[in-house]
Amino acid sequence: MHGISVISEASRETEINEAGLSDEAESNVSEDVVSNANAGGMKPVHAGVEERNEVSTVAEATPLPLDEPTDEPLDASDRLPAADLEVEQSMLPLARQNVTFEQRVGYVVAVVVLGGTIAVSATILFAVPSLWRFAVIPGWLALAGFMTFSSHFWPQIKHRHYRWRSSDAGMEIHRGVLWKHRIAIPVLRVQHVDVSQGPVQRLFELGSLTIHTAGTRNASVIIEGLGYENALQLRDELLAQKETLDASE
Amino acid sequence: MQASEFEGELQEQLVNTAHYVSNEPLGPLLESASSNWDEPRRLHYSSVIFEAISKVREYIFPAVIGLFSATQGGWGIWIAGIVFGGSVLATLLRYFTLRYGIQDGEFVIKEGLLFRRTRSVPIRKIQNVDLVQNVLHRVFGVAEVKVETASGTEAEATLRVLTKLQIEELRAVVLDVNADEVAPDERLSGEGTLPAVSSATSLSGRSRLLHTISTKNLIQAGVCSNRGAVFIGIVFGFFFQGQFVEGWQPGAGRHFWRKYIPSTSWLPDWIDTSWLSGWAGITLLCVVLFFLLRLLGMIWYVHRFYGYRLEQVGNDFWISCGLLTRVSATVPRNRIQFISVHRPLLLRWMGLASIRIETAGGAGVESENASTTVSRRWFVPVLMDDEVDELLSKLRPEMNWLESKSEMVWHGVSPLTEKRLQRKAIIFGVIATAVGLAVMRPWGWIAGPLLVPILLWLACKKSRAKRFGRADWGVVYQSGFLIRKMSFAFFDRIQGVGIQQSPFDRRWKMATLQVDTAAAGPAEHTIDIACLDQEFAIQQFGEFQRDAAKQRPSWA
């Protein structure tokens, strides 16, 4: 099996963001580290975007739980029991630059929508010869507020509520801000894995990992916003893992 | 591996392989057949007729339009003629050029004159050889054959039509190869050769009858079903045409009577005068429709499933049934993804149930045909309640349901569920009242308060009906009060596990546990265990995940 070294943007960011949390990822994360991370780690850190180029150099140190020669597969009983569906801080977040990417895309959409709405409604309203026509301005402001929220803040919030983990038990994803969702795909159920990258994603060195299963609802599980290199590595590891498991027994 | 087990017990239940049309034993038929596949086979000559019929069905609309414009003196008749002529030519061409056969363990179909098309399917990949035989087919002693593999949503090949002998030949080969796979010790000969005759004799010995359905049970099931609803809808649409509805007032009953009963001299006078007569008419209509619905359901069930037989041959289940149109379908056991036992209220009262299954691959819901309908949606359309457990343990022996049923530890939903559902019922009642008041005055509001007690009662029943149990082989989930469904998913078939929580769930500290299987269609029951206590759900999520990861996915 490949040495598991899915340590590129995502986990590096974890280091920066969350007080070196991923260094401890292999030993069971002690509670105080989690609380540290909770306390200080959640603020957006902008350093990550500038240091994007050094990605490959970081990719050696901390092995993931996968590398440990454990007898038992890592599973729920090894973890701290969670009382609710908030994300587990011991899991990996998406690439930091994904937030920037989503924000930039959001800004463009916001400008187009806002500009378009204002232009159209203004043209119509110039025909209205009453002061009432200015009543639309609060509407514009509300729209602007909403667009600001959805383009600037929402990606950050979303990022905070997204975690993934690849272990012997398979792939696990926790996501969702209001509607919370967890998905677990055992390695042996993975049919094939795709990595894709859109043109704008390429600028940010982002990629999407799609895991296909034979299931119905979760026939394809997409992790959008991983670092591209990271996604490629993860794909190789998943397939290698599957191959080893298939060969055994 | 199943063969010895079968032969040991239930000798009297051994049946000959008369799986689809007749009760003639297969052996002599096959001996007369040439069992070598060097010569490619042709379709039966009546294929031309059936192919033409299906073509006519396809072109019926253009043809009607063409004929219509022909009556107007246009050149539509020529178009219609060309279309028809073309399709007849295509039909003939298909009949004369199509050859099928078996070469090097592959099922091969060749067709076409200018554009030759060759399709080959490895026999090992074939999982079903399904037949449909309608009345006209029976006249010629032939049937339509669908060869299906696990992949894809459509049949790999449709052979329209083959004779009984040809079909049995084909089936024997497929079964033989697949039997070789499950029982290598029973391998009859070396690679390459496929001795049809010897396998056929062992085949008839391997078949075991699992279930038949009496006509009485079919009628009962038909009475309980709402299958006639479609026809009733048509009747209603027809009936409410015209001014019956437009002129409808509570006092306008006489319109109804006068319209549909020509001579009303025998009717009492108040029919014309009293407002009661209108309501009497409506009531009568409803009663008539109700009985019609039941009758149609009955007819549908009897027509579809008359003479139902479920047999086990090796590792396959064979189903055959039908009164006018006979259907014969196979379901390989290791393709079964999901088993669901349905017990609607009426059926429950009669002590009956039905079993549906999901298989991997094969047709989806949207492309259902007669044979898939039978083999998946209506795996066992009706059976006695006390036979369910035994049959289930035959469908999936590893499950050992007869024993594990009593050992099963059932987990209920969160204790808050009842309260939550009741609150939902009350909110719904309030909304219904408000809407009713707004839409229809002065009595529109009355529906809401009337509904609330019923909804509360249902909420209570529903939350109590919901439970699940976990064994080392899989999960059992039961839910529903009006239609009680009990479904079985197996860890080696579970594709993924999920957990979901909406903001409303969060308020009640609940979550939904989801299990994803390869097919979720005809059984109409997905394992979405809602309203679990969130902490418990998270714990179960972890354990499901672990158990599913431990088991290798097993499908052929």
Image: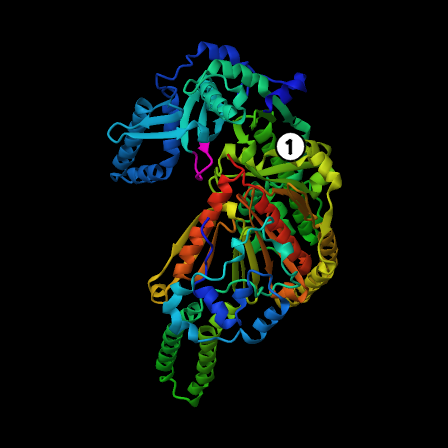
Main SS, magenta region, reads loop
Q: Is residue B221 left or right of residue A19?
A: right
State which region is magenta. Answer: B148-155
Q: Position of residue B245 (x, y in %)?
A: 57, 53
Give the residue drawn at x 72%, y 52%.
B412
**Rendered position, B531 above or below B378:** below
Quickly name the residue at label 1.
Answer: B397
Query: Mark 1, chain letter?
Result: B
Q: Position of residue B285 (x, y in %)?
A: 64, 45
What type is the residue that disc 1 sits on? Answer: Pro
Give the residue drawn at x 48%, y 72%.
A16
Task: Between residue A24 and residue B170, name the one nearer to us.
Answer: A24
- In what quadrant of the picture does the N terminus of chain B appear? top right
Secondary element type, mark 1: helix
What colouring does the structure picture have?
rainbow
Whether residue A178 appears in this view of the structure is yes
**Rendered position, A100 above or below B330:** below
Task: Between residue B47 and residue B311, name the one nearer to us.
Answer: B311
